[in-house]
């Protein structure tokens, strides 16, 4: 899909390399500039899973000769991705002004938590902090419980890497038409706030009080514990699906469940369903709802999910808990996902920019 697109990635952590890997899965030529003497991981010192499908060259950006190599790479590139704190790339001499003065069409993708500007721009932070400040963490757990989300998904990946990807692809589209690049200021806090748009569009169905909104308070939109300590998810929003849910449980004539959207009824309805689901193990409830439109699914571990019949049919996971490309395309399939060792492609990369050693 992105054949012919060259991306230079400055080694970083988390969402920036995730975004670059996604571009590589889509067919872009991604060259990651690793730090000389750096270590990818404790398990594989010269190899990082997020670098699969990329090519690597190790450079010291404080060294004049290596500096020159990076300039050679950038002059043949369409995109630069960096995830440093604001000002770091400028101090190294590779800020947007310097780079785009030499490569006007280049799309300069910047990945940070707080953004390039603002009172917190220079502060450290992580996924949970960004989504907390953005408002995205507010509805993460039932009322009365401590807000918590799956690590990295809402912030680093959802609000960070995927928004960086959207910005980069939009910038490339514009550059192909105008010859002028852009700087993509992808802040996780911005992306997490933007993702709230669907919830905030619900108007009167969204409450500032936790547990009172259409999706974070009802008995039909939550997870329940089963007899074996496993859990089941329920989210039958529409009346027709709610009716199927009640039919499966034999509650279609129970007057306590007649009012689906009355918030005052939710606590009693929740308590009854909590007691009911605790009477049987997860597998029992899976069998009860199997093949129906009740909008019920088991809560699975990643390993269990990889072996689920639907997930296996979709081929969502490769070996080693590595996700396959998403979304799917009718005329493109990822062709390679080779491991990437640090500095393994130095000779071929230097040859491509006319700097054979």
Image (cartoon, rainbow, N blue to C red):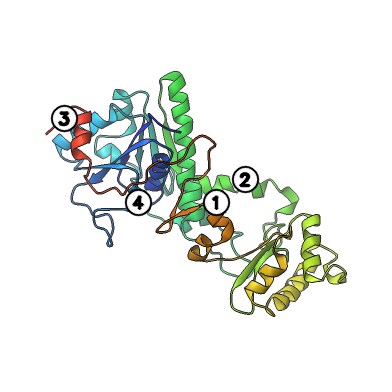
Q: Please tell me how crowded label 4 is: few (under 14), some (14-19), or many (20+) other residues with Cα within 10 Å.
A: few
Q: Residue furthest left?
A: 357
What distance separates the C-alpha of mark 2 from that of mark 1? Answer: 29 Å
Image point (31%, 53%), residue name: 48
* 5 shown above or below 251: above
Image point (49%, 31%), residue name: 170
Closer mark to the observer between disc 3 and disc 4: 3
The answer to whether any part of residue 261 appears in the image is no
Q: In this orientation, which residue lies closer to the viewer: 274 or 5? A: 5
Image point (51%, 49%), residue name: 158
What distance separates the C-alpha of mark 2 from that of mark 4? Answer: 27 Å
* 338 shown above or below 252: above
User: Mark 3 vs mark 4: which is more N-terminal?
Assistant: 4
Q: In this orientation, which residue lies closer to the viewer: 99 or 179? A: 179
User: Mark 1 vs mark 4: which is more N-terminal?
Assistant: 4
| Image-quadrant location for residue 255 | bottom right
The mark found on residue 314 in the picture is: 1
Circle 2 is placed at which residue position?
Answer: 197
What distance separates the C-alpha of mark 2 from that of mark 3? Answer: 49 Å
User: Mark 3 vs mark 1: which is more N-terminal?
Assistant: 1
Circle 4 is placed at which residue position?
Answer: 13
Locate residue 330, reporting x and y percent. Answer: 54, 36
């Amino acid at each position: 899909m992105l054949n012919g697109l060259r991306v230079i990635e400055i080694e970083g952590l988390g969402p920036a390399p995730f975004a670059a890997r996604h571009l590589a899965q889509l067919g872009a030529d991604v060259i990651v500039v690793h730090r000389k003497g750096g270590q990818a991981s404790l398990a594989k010192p010269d190899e990082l899973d997020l670098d699969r499908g990329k090519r690597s060259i190790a450079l010291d950006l404080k060294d004049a000769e290596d500096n020159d190599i990076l300039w050679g790479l950038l002059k043949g590139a369409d995109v630069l991705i960096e995830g440093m704190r604001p000002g770091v790339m400028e101090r190294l001499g590779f800020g947007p002004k310097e780079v785009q003065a030499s490569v006007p069409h280049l799309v300069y993708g910047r990945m940070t938590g707080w953004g390039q500007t603002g009172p917190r721009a220079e502060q450290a932070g992580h996924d949970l902090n960004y989504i907390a400040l953005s408002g995205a963490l507010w509805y993460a757990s039932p009322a009365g419980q401590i807000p918590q989300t799956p690590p990295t998904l809402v912030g680093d990946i959802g609000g960070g890497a995927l928004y960086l990807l959207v910005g980069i692809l939009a910038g490339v589209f514009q550059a192909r038409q105008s010859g002028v690049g852009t700087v993509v200021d992808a802040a996780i806090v911005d992306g997490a706030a933007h993702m709230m748009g669907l919830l905030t569009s619900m108007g009167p169905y969204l409450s500032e009080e936790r547990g009172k909104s259409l999706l974070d308070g009802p008995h039909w939109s939550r997870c329940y514990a089963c007899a074996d300590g496993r859990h089941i998810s329920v989210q039958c929003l529409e009346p027709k699906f709610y009716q199927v849910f009640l039919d499966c449980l034999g509650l279609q004539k129970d007057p306590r469940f007649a009012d689906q959207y009355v918030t005052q009824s939710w606590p009693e309805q929740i308590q009854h369903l909590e007691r009911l689901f605790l009477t049987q193990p997860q597998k029992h409830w899976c069998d009860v709802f199997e093949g129906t439109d009740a909008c019920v699914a088991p809560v699975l571990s990643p390993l269990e999910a990889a072996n689920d019949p639907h997930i296996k049919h979709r081929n969502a996971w490769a070996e080693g808990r590595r996700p396959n490309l998403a979304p799917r395309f009718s005329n493109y399939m990822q062709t390679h996902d080779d491991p990437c060792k640090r500095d393994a492609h130095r000779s071929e990369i230097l040859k491509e920019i006319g700097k054979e050693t």
